[in-house]
Image: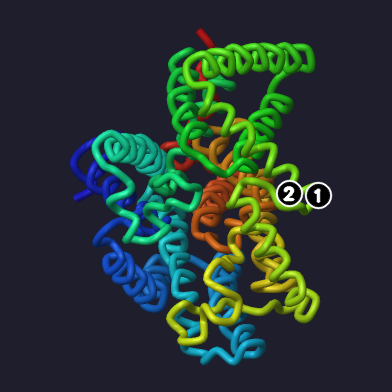
Amino acid sequence: MRQDSKGGRGSTALRICLALVFLMSWRTLQYFPGMHYVQELWYVLCFLALVFVYPAWKYLNRLRLTSFEIYVVVLTLVAVLLPAWGAKREFGQPLVYGLLAQRAAVLTAPVLLLFVAMRSHRVQPRDIEWALLSLGWGTLVLYSLMLLFLNPENFLSYGIGFADAGGGKAVFRFPMGFIVFALIYYTLLGFRTRRTRHYVAAAILLIWVVSSADARWFLVSLTATFVYFLYQWRPLGQFVGTIAKGCCVFAVVIGFGYAVSPDYLATRAAGFSDAFRVVFTGSAVADISANIRVFETLTALPYIQKNPLLGNGTISNQWERGQDILGPYFYPGDIGLIGALYSVGVLGLVVFAYQFWFAYGAARKLSRRRHSPLFDAAIGFLLLNAIGSITATEFVYFPETTLLFIAILVALAYEEDCGRRRVIHGEQRASMPGITHGYPTSS
């Protein structure tokens, strides 16, 4: 039996279950050796949960259907049917291949179940916070151990989702969603409290992300996200001073890096240069990955012009003609908004992007006293995804990640509305347990 949310075996078991659900729903281990079939089983369980468990739980808790839940269900149907129909219409792909290619859309089921669990107070914000941070540190330790004790050249046969030698050197491909969340969490917590221990935790995570992430626009988006929060939370003078200090620290780190490993930093700098040259000139460069994105963009543009509203769907690799039509190196998810327009068109992109409207509305409803580290980190993660969608449209291809945080915000906003109604009717206001009312002062 579940004990008080502050501790106890019941609370620990719930948090471990949440962590496992998040781990599988974010497809973190999908390409790890031996995990393919486990992930496929998870899709089946999510489908059953979406069709049977979620409606039954809603009925038993007598909770009305909210506009957010209706949207998530509609989005799930659109994510499955629109690409499947588009590929059948444009390329003649049998409908069943298109439907199975979009089976990951059922990962919205855990989002809906979490939303119901929060509304019925069976899951508290501190439980979600614990699960996400544990996954952040846990995956960082796991990936670090892999780098120390495993040679990626021995795992190239498992596919580019796990290990890749496309750049000439074999490297592991690590899904870093939870590490990025933890980085945003501790950085924003440091901005709020100005406590050294939070900055130290953020620095550890940042060093790992910067040294491991190949996505250059991601690093630009991450910087823009932190600058935005600094601008919002600091007076102009402090904001300018903090930026100046940050630039000085960055210069010192770069200088130290050149002294320790000049070849590595020179390679990273060349990568940034090639990426921007491709974006602004469209010309070929030395960077293979950047050139591939040029090829993918040029491949997608004629199809976007042909089917701008509803897109061209998703071609399944299991279909016998799949790789013969557009080639084995065409992945719409690699080219951000252009890839999204290719796959689902303007109308589909609008449907997917509408999820950010729920986040915006929920954030506006929540009063200042309801801000918490989880609230700030959720907003930060969504902002990072919105900025980064130019080159990596995760809210289209991995909506389960963004919808998780939107569900948290909408559930907290719903609780805020309920509290206001209780105040209006003269009842004692009872807030959802686990929400931090304000931050501790700096020390």
Percent position (x, y) of residue 359? 64, 51
Q: Residues within 10 Å of mark 2 (few under 14, many from 20)?
A: some
Q: Can the viewer see residue 104?
A: yes
Q: Which residue is drawn at 33% across and 46% down?
A: 152
Residue type at mark 1?
Thr
Q: What element carries label 1?
A: helix
Percent position (x, y) of residue 226? 64, 30
Does residue 254 sit above or below 164 in this rendering?
A: above
Percent position (x, y) of residue 354? 68, 62
Q: Residue at x 58, y 14 (%)?
A: 255
Q: How crowded is mark 1: few (under 14 residues within 10 Å), some or many (20 or more)?
A: few
Does residue 290 sit above or below 52 in this rendering?
A: above
Look at mark 2 in the image and give the residue it sits on: 278
Q: In which quarter of the image is residue 364?
A: top right
Q: What element carries label 2?
A: helix
Q: In which quarter of the image is residue 39?
A: bottom left
Look at mark 1 in the image and give the residue it sits on: 281
Q: Distance between the residues labelled 1 and 2?
A: 5 Å
Residue type at mark 2?
Val
254 horizontally vs 181: left or right: right
Q: Can the viewer see residue 441?
A: no
